Image (tube, rainbow, N blue to C red):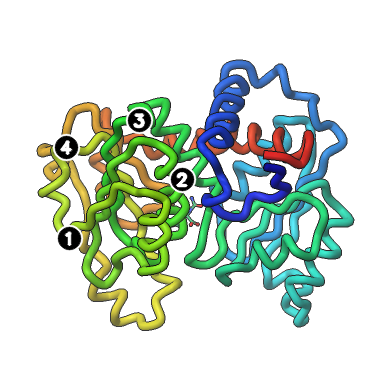
Amino acid sequence: MRQDHLITATQLSRADIEAVLDRAAEIDADPGAVADRYREAVLALCFFEPSTRTKMSFETAIKRLGGATTDMGTVESSSVKKGESLADTVRVVEGYADALVLRHPSEGAAKMAAEFVDVPVINAGDGAGQHPSQTLLDLYTIRENVGLDDLSIGIMGDLKYGRTVHSLAEALTNFDVRQHFISPESLKLPRSVRFDLHNSGAQLREHTDLEEVLPELDVLYVTRIQRERFPDETEYEQIAGEYQIDDDTLELADDDLAVMHPLPRVDEIDPAVDALSQATYFEQAHNGVPVRMALLDFLLSEGEL
Ligand code: NCD
């Protein structure tokens, strides 16, 4: 199916995912082969929320393909501050660029923006909704380290507001994966996400204790408690600090466990874990470049994924 935009992980079939991951592996092995491929291309970066990895890796990706970026800058320094609507902003920006990367605090923002423009829109995070390009680099990292079939993954932390979780869980239903969701009661998966996962045939179980599942995991995907999405700060204070891992926690884990995190971490993973062979999160962040190069290659070449 032709898809001009990347808005949610639900639109990705197993074949789509494998095509992007295979292309990313080719690019990773020989980045010089594509260094001039998109010399005329401009990628627009519209980030209405803070970002380090997503924005910089998209920027690096288009530059390594020979292209350039045009950047809206911060909300504070843009016309959004004057009251411009998202629809108007993206209609203007599409005239400057060949594709548009959008991060926005409102769920559904990328889907809405895609209705107004003809260039490909990549959802780089819409509130507590989705973050599908993160999912592609997560899947790439899992495939490189432990493989994507016959996999047991634990996804831990803020499952309610964590958009990386919502996208990853949905994409994993394309593979033979047992998904264990570990969180406090108040941060469990939203009912709508659980419903969609069941519909997609997910093999899922929910837990409040990591210990009961840790020994059987191949991947432990840790997430940050999304402070900025809590309606009530005192609720955040009560939960922050739970579900941290350190080297003692990992004594129960398999030596080949891959500990992942989309980053930024606050205090969910003790820095002592960084020195362990299981720590995979910096490699995961670096994989953002070849994976986003591959994604841009698909979207810019034919507008198709
Ligand atoms: C994540 C995000 O923005 O959703 N960061 C990222 O893109 N790597 C995770 C987070 O902010 O906790």
- Which of the two labelled residues, at mark 1 and mark 2, occupies the earlier sequence position? 2
For residue 275, say whether it is visible: no
Q: How many marks?
A: 4
Q: Quadrant of residue 93?
A: bottom right
Mark 4, ligand 1, within 8 Å: the answer is no
Mark 3 is surrounded, within 10 Å at the Cα level, by few (under 14), some (14 to 19) or many (20 or more) other residues, namely some
- Which of the two labelled residues, at mark 4 and mark 1, occupies the earlier sequence position? 1
Mark 1 is surrounded, within 10 Å at the Cα level, by few (under 14), some (14 to 19) or many (20 or more) other residues, namely some
For residue 203, say whether it is visible: yes
The residue that label 3 is drawn on is 149
Who's the residue at 78% across and 77% down the image?
A: 84
Three-letter amino acid code of the residue under disc 4? Glu
Q: Quadrant of residue 273?
A: top left
The residue that label 4 is drawn on is 216
Three-letter amino acid code of the residue under disc 1? Thr
Mark in the foreground, 1 or 2: 2
Q: Position of residue 110 (x, y in %)?
A: 65, 62
Depicted 132 relative to depicted 237: above or below: above
The residue that label 2 is drawn on is 171
The residue that label 1 is drawn on is 208
How far apart in space, not on screen, are marks 1 and 2 (Cα)?
Answer: 23 Å
Q: Position of residue 200 (x, y in %)?
A: 42, 51
- Which of the two labelled residues, at mark 3 and mark 2, occupies the earlier sequence position? 3
